[in-house]
Image (cartoon, rainbow, N blue to C red):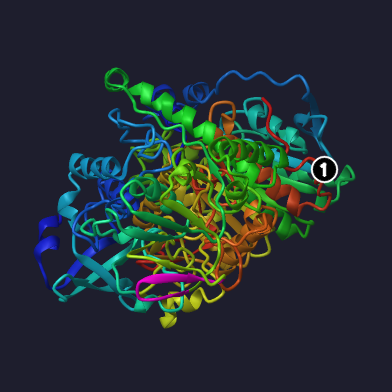
């Protein structure tokens, strides 16, 4: 058996069967399942100093999940101890840490190690990866199989506003929150009203002297219906683990039907819009403000947000909604197109992440030296969201077109991890040195996806969103179907869609 | 992720069948062990005994059956089972829009190789003579029936008879010499077979014939010129490599092959569509594949949900 501790401490060349990049939900799930499958020669590299990925990095006030926690967790690690319906970042992070600990995964994780470049070595049939640790030392890793667990929501996206570099006060992105910046009594500007922004705005509003919320497009917001789970219930969950299974199933199906509205079902869509509109009307009385907060596109086109405390924030005298476009940023103020200048001490970006350009800032060279960004010139695409033609033995977790707007992505991760394990088993069983999806299979899959996409609300709902590729406008991030449908597709491996290289020339007949 | 039902089915088959089948060298006993679960035919499906060109069997039809005819060759190691035992599969195909004929081809050891191949060929010729165009005929089979379906096409190709439009093979047994790696590596995982039993059990059918005869083990045949094939096989069964190697050879010979590997499920799991969701999915995909390659593609019946 390989010694995992050697992998962690040996600064020189490391050689493993499987290298997983990223120690978030995907990486941890992959690691646990590899251990369960008895494939112990693997390594996880993580760029920060702890596990958790998104749930470690995003630490802004009020950060929480907007999928019920009993569902936003592993099916094989159901947690009876969730204290809330929608757990906070802290609690989810603790959950992930406990998963790592319970499965003895920590020896397999190398922290402070950032993936830099991967090159497929055709002759040797493995990936040559170079990573960098915190002190700038280069680290070479050889791996037969490379698995990306890098996810989509971690590279902050900053808007292009003239003059931002001039701004003299503190400024930061929601995912790089600076808790040391004191907001008390300050004049704070928040750019963006997306999923992160509506979570932290209600938390910082009471502290600030003046809070300007710069909104480009109004989001659809539905009631969150969050509640604490009492000790009594947690005790029951602990005593009867099958109860959490039922809760999971119930939550799953109560979220799953909403996909119909995305796929073009008018009835479901209008029902959801009615819920959201009533939520707005009940919380905001001022007709002007209400009009400004009313979205002008179909619900679901952009991510549907959940919040009970965002709308009421505008009742506070110190909070102002600004829908006018920002024309420039000065040293201590922000000027909008209508010429109004607002004094600002702190600037916070709630402007989301780079989603449609995965692997930003890194390089991956596949067969014939093709770099993945070149392969994805016309938008990213992967067969089943997992494998990419030209990149043998490379699997992506939460890759292109496998995000969700209506249900828990952890379900998608588990389906993909199951698929990858299935592939690895087959590679071992059939002595396959390299497997690579055929170009035509990937193309066929992508065409099918975009075909199904055309009718969805994301493409026809009258908005532009981070779901869409910046250049082509195609939706390359979401799965245009139900989770049940995806799980079904991931249940089996269509081997004939793959180009297989046998380790030994076939001896048969 | 494999369904819970698939795990359950494996557990049941291991306990009810594999345990008793292990080391069994008596074909009569093996026949009784392989007797499948009782099955109730849906009321909308009509089953009628018939002979096609002298080969006895049964027609299975449903109200949604169109013009496409499916010749279904049942499995059972060339010595067991019958058209009747494989009704869960034939009924499902009938509900998916096929007129299904399932012949009771002669079985070993009473009737040895090449009796089964002869019967299948006679039956196919009978369908042609009955006015069905080869473009509207498709063949399918599971286990031994899958291997037989390929052998049938090889005989037809050699005789210059027009080939069927497509073939669907479920866990086909294509190598009676039992040389597949998976026979050893999947021995404990397989829900049904004990690896070392495979080669001896082929003797019921083969007698003294060479197990590498291409008409007994189509894996050893030249596969060029065959119609598109869909192969579904369990990743964890002993006969896995009978499929993977056949697919590789067929593809190399220029045949269109769709090979799909399913984790966990038992050998020929399509026989239990009521229990295993993977069986329903596999049968649905196979029906869609066969319809899409048959001339009389009846788009209405494609994708019809399975009700049983």
Secondary structure, mark 1, is helix
> Residue drawn 36% across and 74% down?
A361
| Residue projecting furthest to the right | B131
Quadrant of the image for the N terminus of chain B? top left
Q: In the rendered structure, does residue A458 fall within the stretch colored magenta?
A: no
Quadrant of the image for the C terminus of chain B? top right
> Residue drawn 79% across and 56% down?
B161
- Counting from the top left corner in percent of width and height, residue B281 is at 59, 39
Residue B181, compared with residue A372, is above or below; it is above
Evaluate whether residue A182 shows in this view: yes
Crowding near the residue tagged with mark 1, few <14, some 14–19, many ≥20 C-alpha atoms within 10 Å: some
| Residue projecting furthest to the bottom | A369
Could you say which is closer to the camera, residue A138 or residue B227? A138
Residue B143, compared with residue A47, is above or below; it is above
Could you say which is closer to the camera, residue B54 or residue A467? A467
Which range is magenta?
A328-337
Q: Is residue B102 left or right of residue A284?
A: right
Could you say which is closer to the camera, residue B153 or residue A36? A36
State the residue position of label 1.
Answer: B127
- Counting from the top left corner in percent of width and height, residue A425 is at 36, 51
Residue A432, compared with residue A374, is above or below; it is above
- Counting from the top left corner in percent of width and height, residue A437 is at 49, 65
- Counting from the top left corner in percent of width and height, residue A178 is at 25, 59
> Residue drawn 79% across and 57% down?
B162
Could you say which is closer to the camera, residue A333 or residue B34? A333
Residue A410, compared with residue A333, is above or below; it is above
């Amino acid at each position: 058996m390989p010694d995992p501790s050697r992998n962690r401490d040996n600064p020189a060349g490391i050689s493993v069967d499987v290298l997983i990049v990223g120690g978030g939900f995907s990486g941890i799930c992959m690691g646990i399942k590899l251990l369960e499958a008895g494939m112990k020669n693997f390594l996880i590299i993580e760029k920060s100093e702890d596990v958790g990925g998104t749930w470690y990095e995003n630490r802004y006030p009020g950060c929480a999940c907007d999928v019920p926690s009993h569902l936003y967790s592993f099916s094989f690690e159901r947690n009876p101890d969730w204290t809330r319906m929608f757990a906070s970042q802290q609690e989810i992070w603790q959950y992930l840490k406990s998963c790592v600990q319970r499965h003895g995964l920590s020896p397999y994780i190398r922290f402070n190690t950032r993936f830099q470049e991967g090159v497929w070595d055709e002759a040797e049939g493995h990936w040559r990866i170079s990573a960098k640790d915190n002190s700038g030392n280069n680290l070479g890793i050889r791996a037969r199989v490379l698995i990306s667990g890098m996810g989509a929501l971690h590279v902050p996206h900053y808007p292009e506003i003239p003059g931002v570099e001039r701004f003299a006060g503190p400024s930061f992105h929601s995912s790089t929150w600076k808790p040391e910046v004191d907001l008390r009594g300050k004049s704070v500007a928040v750019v963006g009203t997306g999923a992160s922004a509506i979570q932290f705005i209600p938390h910082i509003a009471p502290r600030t002297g003046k809070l300007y919320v710069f909104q480009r497009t109004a989001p659809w917001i539905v009631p969150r219906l969050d509640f604490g789970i009492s000790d009594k219930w947690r005790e029951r969950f602990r005593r009867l683990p099958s109860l959490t299974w039922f809760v999971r199933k119930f939550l799953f199906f109560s979220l799953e039907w909403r996909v119909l509205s995305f796929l073009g079902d008018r009835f479901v869509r209008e029902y959801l819009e009615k819920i959201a509109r009533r939520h707005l009307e009940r919380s905001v009385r001022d007709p002007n403000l209400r009009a400004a907060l009313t979205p002008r596109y179909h619900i679901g086109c952009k991510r549907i947000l959940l919040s009970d405390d965002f709308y009421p924030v505008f009742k506070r005298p110190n909070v102002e909604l600004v829908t006018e476009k920002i024309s420039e940023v000065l040293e201590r103020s922000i000027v909008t197109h209508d010429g109004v200048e607002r004094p600002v001490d702190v600037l916070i970006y709630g402007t989301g992440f780079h989603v449609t350009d995965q692997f930003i800032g890194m390089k991956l060279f596949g067969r014939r030296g093709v770099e993945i960004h070149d392969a994805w010139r016309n938008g990213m695409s992967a067969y089943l969201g997992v494998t990419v033609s030209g990149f043998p033995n490379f699997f992506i977790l939460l890759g292109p077109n496998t995000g969700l707007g209506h249900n828990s992505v952890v379900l998608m991760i588990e389906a993909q991890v199951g698929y990858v394990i299935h592939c690895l088993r087959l590679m071992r069983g059939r002595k396959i040195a390299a497997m690579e999806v055929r170009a035509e299979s990937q193309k066929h899959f992508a065409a099918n996806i975009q075909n199904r996409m055309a009718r969805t609300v994301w493409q026809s709902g009258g908005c532009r969103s981070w779901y869409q590729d910046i250049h082509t406008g195609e939706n390359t991030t979401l799965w245009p179907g139900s989770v049940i449908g995806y799980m079904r597709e991931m249940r089996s491996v269509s081997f004939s869609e793959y180009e297989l290289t046998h380790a030994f020339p076939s001896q048969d007949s | 992720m494999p369904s819970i039902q698939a795990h359950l089915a494996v557990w049941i088959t291991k306990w009810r069948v594999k345990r008793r089948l292990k080391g069994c060298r008596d074909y009569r006993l093996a026949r009784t062990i392989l007797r499948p679960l009782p099955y109730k035919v849906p009321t909308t499906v009509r089953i009628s005994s018939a002979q096609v060109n002298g080969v006895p069997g049964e027609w299975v039809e449903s109200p949604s059956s169109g013009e496409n005819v499916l010749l279904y060759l049942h499995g059972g190691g060339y010595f067991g089972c019958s058209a009747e035992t494989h009704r869960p599969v034939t009924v499902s195909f009938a509900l998916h829009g096929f007129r299904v004929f399932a012949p009771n081809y002669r079985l070993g050891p009473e009737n040895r190789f090449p009796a089964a191949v002869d019967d299948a060929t006679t039956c196919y010729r009978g369908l042609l003579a009955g006015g069905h165009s080869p473009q509207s005929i498709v063949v399918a089979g599971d286990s031994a029936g899958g291997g037989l379906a390929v052998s049938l096409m090889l005989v037809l190709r050699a005789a210059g008879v027009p080939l069927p439009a497509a073939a669907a093979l479920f866990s086909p047994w294509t190598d009676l010499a039992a040389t597949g790696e998976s026979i050893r590596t999947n021995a404990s995982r397989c829900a049904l077979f004990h690896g070392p039993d495979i080669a001896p059990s082929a003797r019921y059918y083969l007698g003294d014939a060479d197990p590498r005869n291409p008409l007994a083990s189509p894996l050893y045949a030249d596969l060029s010129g065959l119609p598109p094939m869909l192969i579904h096989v369990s990743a964890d069964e002993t006969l896995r490599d009978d499929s993977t190697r056949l697919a590789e050879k067929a593809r190399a010979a220029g045949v269109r092959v769709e090979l799909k590997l399913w984790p966990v499920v038992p050998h020929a799991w399509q026989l239990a569509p009521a229990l295993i969701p993977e069986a329903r999915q596999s049968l649905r995909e196979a029906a869609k594949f066969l319809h899409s390659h048959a001339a009389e593609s009846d788009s209405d019946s494609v994708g019809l949900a399975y009700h049983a």
